[in-house]
């Protein structure tokens, strides 16, 4: 059992640089491709664009950003867990937050090369609804959907 306590909190700009570093490292490991945007552009995206349409929550352990999720009532835009903290239930904790605050239906995209993410989403009730490659990375992707069993 892990002796460290995970704290889930709303995003605060004091964690911006840590969040972007974790996000970039996790994404690069997951897809085997360097981030195409500069660090500063990524910071701007997080602080000024993503926050317009999505709630952002962070998972903190000992004051360090170990995960993040950006979602609204219909869509998960981003979900990343620090590469050293994957498999500890952090992703599930953040995903559960999004499900609880959803309309009862969520969609998201993940890259085909990210097999770990596919297994994670399928384990948590997401089903494939389409495939494509309309993304900046020009990689094949998968669109998933989760529907709450509480919808009548």
Image (cartoon, rainbow, N blue to C red):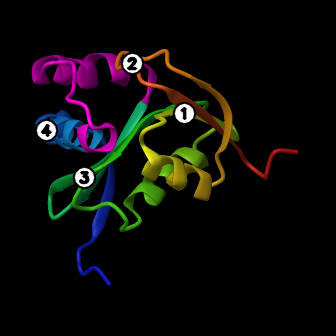
Residue 39 horizontal side relative to residue 96, left or right: left
Residue at x 27%, y 37% (from the top left corner): 32
Pick the front one: 23 or 150: 23
Residue 150 image point, x, y percent: 79, 51
Which mark is nearer the camera, 3 or 4?
A: 3
Disc nearer the start of the sequence (1/3): 3
Disc nearer the start of the sequence (2/4): 4
Which mark is nearer the camera, 1 or 4?
A: 1
Disc nearer the start of the sequence (3/4): 4
Residue 129 image point, x, y percent: 69, 32
Rounded to the nearest whole Å, what is the CA distance between mark 1 and mark 4? 27 Å
Q: Where 8 falls versus 35 (above or below)?
A: below
**Where is mark 2, residue-wise?**
52
Local SS, label 4? helix
Q: How many marks?
A: 4
Question: Hey, which quadrant is residue 89 in on the image?
Answer: bottom left
Rounded to the nearest whole Å, what is the CA distance between mark 1 and mark 3? 19 Å
Pick the front one: 116 or 50: 116
Which mark is nearer the camera, 1 or 2?
A: 1
Local SS, label 2? helix
Disc nearer the start of the sequence (1/2): 2
Rounded to the nearest whole Å, what is the CA distance between mark 3 and mark 4? 18 Å
Please tell me the numbered disc located at residue 82: 3
Rounded to the nearest whole Å, what is the CA distance between mark 3 and mark 2? 24 Å
Local SS, label 3? loop
Residue 150 horizontal side relative to residue 59, left or right: right
Residue at x 14%, y 42% (from the top left corner): 18
**Where is mark 4, residue-wise?**
14
**Where is mark 1, residue-wise?**
108
Q: Which residues are magenta?
A: 28-54
Q: Where 14 falls versus 35 (above or below)?
A: below
Question: Hey, which quadrant is residue 5 in on the image?
Answer: bottom left
């Amino acid at each position: 059992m892990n002796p460290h306590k995970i704290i889930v909190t709303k995003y605060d700009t004091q964690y911006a640089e840590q969040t972007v570093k974790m996000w970039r490292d996790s994404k690069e490991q997951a897809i085997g491709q360097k981030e195409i945007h500069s660090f500063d552009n990524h910071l701007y995206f997080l602080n000024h664009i993503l926050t317009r349409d999505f709630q952002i929550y962070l998972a903190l352990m000992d004051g360090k950003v170990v995960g993040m999720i950006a979602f609204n009532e219909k869509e998960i835009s981003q979900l990343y867990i620090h590469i050293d903290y994957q498999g500890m239930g952090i992703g599930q904790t953040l995903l559960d937050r999004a499900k609880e605050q959803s309309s009862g239906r969520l969609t998201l995209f993940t890259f085909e090369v990210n097999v770990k993410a596919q297994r994670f989403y399928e384990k948590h009730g997401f089903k494939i609804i389409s495939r494509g490659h309309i993304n900046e990375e020009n990689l094949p992707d998968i669109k998933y959907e989760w529907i709450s069993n509480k919808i009548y």
